Image (spheres, helix red, strand yellow):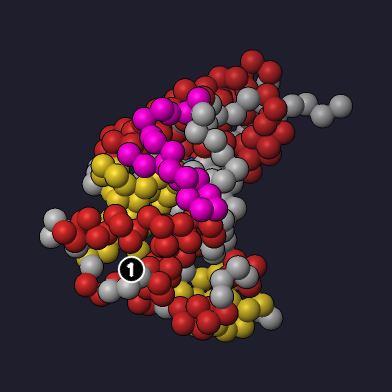
Amino acid sequence: MNTPVVPDGAYARFCELVYQKTGLFFDEDKRYFVESRIKRRMKATDSESFRSYFVNLRFARDNEEMQSLVNELTINETYFNREPLHFDAMMDEFLPDYMAAKALKGKKELKIWCIPCSTGEEPYTIAMHLLERLHGVDDWDIHIHASDIDTRVVEHAQEGVYNTRSVKNLPSQWVKNYFHHHDHDGQKQFQISDGLRGSVDFSLVNMTDPVDVRKMRGMDVIFCRNVLFYFDEATRSKVANHLHGCLNRGGLFYISTTESMSRVSNLFKPRRFEKCLGYVR
Ligand SMILES: C[S@@+](CC[C@H](N)C(=O)[O-])C[C@H]1O[C@@H](n2cnc3c(N)ncnc32)[C@H](O)[C@@H]1O
């Protein structure tokens, strides 16, 4: 019989430490996944036993091993133009009135935050929609911020190199406009153009840390899609309420079409668009 990597009582203590430090919530159901990631980190750090790995993780002077572990524990699935109804509703139904009201007040500035951004497909998609579809885009001062807790994905996003699967949902003309493609080991690779890369600011943010989140105030739109499943109910509410504080009055907030705001936060007002749901402050 295989001896478990993590002794029974220690698994709960390990999950509690990860929860405290990052907000990522794992329970017995995720044990197989979590143990496989711990094994990788034990191998990478030459740890002889789980106990010695855990002691090093817990008492390390810096955050380095916790960050490497987090990078292993996150699931970064994403692609360009994912859940496109959100982009259509933002472009066709939300922004026209919202921006007209801002322009009337003489504030031709728009701030959009994509959290979490994973490997960058989502914020670059937002940039493409704005460039392709926003009338008078050059008259506006537009900032697109994109953040994630995982250092590897943020680096990937900044490099901006993708495969065929990532770009499959984009109109082919957009692929031509915004990527250079070349072959790498027989596989097609798509490198985002310098212009588009420069239009997104990437940063490391732990969205369960209120100090990190509070740095990003005054947003007009926040995309917060496909992340709530990581958290328990208490953390989901905390995260949603802190993000609410980062949104301007009247600003738009999206979670994924597969996620629900019920029992998460009652601070947002639902906004029913023609084909999807958003939330406003
Ligand atoms: C499935 S991806 C979603 C990416 C994108 N929003 C989308 O919908 O395609 C989830 C991302 O959440 C990030 N994440 C998990 N916990 C986080 C936290 N506490 N703070 C910031 N990002 C986090 C993970 O690193 C991962 O890249």
In the rendered image, residue 112, in percent from the top left (x then y), is placed at 33, 55
| 100 is within the stretch colored magenta | no
Residue corresponding to mark 1? 199
In the rendered image, residue 65, in percent from the top left (x then y), is placed at 47, 40
Residue 257 vs residue 42, the one in the foreground? 257
- Residue in view at x 13 percent, y 60 percent: 106
| 280 is within the stretch colored magenta | yes
Question: Is ligand 1 less than 8 Å from the beta carbon at label 1?
Answer: no
- Residue in view at x 29 percent, y 44 percent: 250
Magenta extent: 263-281
| Residue, far left | 106
Residue 216 vs residue 170, the one in the foreground? 170
Count of marks overlaid on the render: 1
Label 1 SS: loop
Q: In this picture, is 17 found above or below 222?
A: above
Instruction: Tell me the kind of residue under disc 1.
Output: Ser
Task: Locate the N terminus by quadrant.
Answer: top right
Relative to 273, 46 lies left or right: right
- Residue in view at x 42 percent, y 78 percent: 193
| Residue, far right | 1
In the rendered image, residue 175, in percent from the top left (x then y), is placed at 53, 78
